[in-house]
């Protein structure tokens, strides 16, 4: 039991490090920075670690990126909603296609909507309720495609079997 938790914690730390190290790679779309690597990390965490590690990782990664100046406060709702929804869907269905859809809906729609109050309160942005949905969708689709390719490679080489939650 302790060995499994230690392995999960170590892998979570590695995935957080990937998310933070790759944070200079972003695509500007409107007022937001689209960060596809976070979405790739969300899907990987959902599959190999589970939903709760995924949400914790999304929070820590967003916090570190905000502290380093490579992310914004909008990263919190997007990444955390996506991580939770795709983690729960994978946990209960074990179906990768539904997990990918859940990441896209969780981040793109739910996270995009949840970003609106943060933008109006902390960024003094006067934007419409759905202003962040399209930019978040662009980001999460790109990251989810990267994750799907990576997971397919991990499955083909039987590496994924060693880590699956």
Image: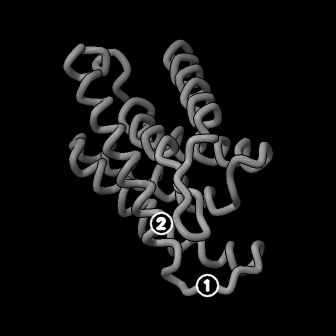
In the rendered structure, are the residues bearing label 2 and label 1 in contact, judged by CB atoms less than 8 Å apart? no
Camera-side residue of 7 and 40: 40
Count neighbours of disc 2 (C-alpha within 10 A) and say few if under 14, some if 14 to 19, many if 20 or more: many
Task: State the image quarter where residue 33 is shown.
Answer: bottom right
Density class for disc 1 (Cα within 10 Å; few <14, some 14-19, many ≥20) is few
Secondary structure under tag 2 reads helix
Residue 13 locus on image (x, y percent): 61, 26
- 2 lies above or below 38: above
Residue at 57 percent across and 24 percent down: it is 14
Residue 50 disc label: none
Query: Residue at image x 66%, y 48%?
Result: 62
Q: Which residue is mark 1?
A: 127
Disc 2 marks which residue?
135
Who is closer to the viewer here, 150 or 163?
150
Label whose residue precedes the other's in the sequence (2 or 1): 1
CA distance for labels 2 and 1? 13 Å
Horizontal side, residue 101 vs residue 23: left or right: left
In percent of width and height, residue 58 lies at: 58, 46
Q: In front: 159, or 1?
A: 159
Q: Residue at x 73, y 42 (%)?
A: 64
User: x%, y% of residue 29?
Assistant: 52, 64
Image coloring type: one colour
Say how many tags the image has.
2
Question: The C terminus is located in which quarter?
Answer: top left
Drawn side of residue 110 relative to residue 74, left or right = left
* Relative to 18, 97 lies left or right: left
Residue 127, image x, y percentages: 61, 84
Residue 139 sits above or below residue 119 on the image: above
Q: Which element type, helix, strand or loop, lies under badge 1?
A: loop
Q: Residue at x 43, y 40 (%)?
A: 40
């Amino acid at each position: 039991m302790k060995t499994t938790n230690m392995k999960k914690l170590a892998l979570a730390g590695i995935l957080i490090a990937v998310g933070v190290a790759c944070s200079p790679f972003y695509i500007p779309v409107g007022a937001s920075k689209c960060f596809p690597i976070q979405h790739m990390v969300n899907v990987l965490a959902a599959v190999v670690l589970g939903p709760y590690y995924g949400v914790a990782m999304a929070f820590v990664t967003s916090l570190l990126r905000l502290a380093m100046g490579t992310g914004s406060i909008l990263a919190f709702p997007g990444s955390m909603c996506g991580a939770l929804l795709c983690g729960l869907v994978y946990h209960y269905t074990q179906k990768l296609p539904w997990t990918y859809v859940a990441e896209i809906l969780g981040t793109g729609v739910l996270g995009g909507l949840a970003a609106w109050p943060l933008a109006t309160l902390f960024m003094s942005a006067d934007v419409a309720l759905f202003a962040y949905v399209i930019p978040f969708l662009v980001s999460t689709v790109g990251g989810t495609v990267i994750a799907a390719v990576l997971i397919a490679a991990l499955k083909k080489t039987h590496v994924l079997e060693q880590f699956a939650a």
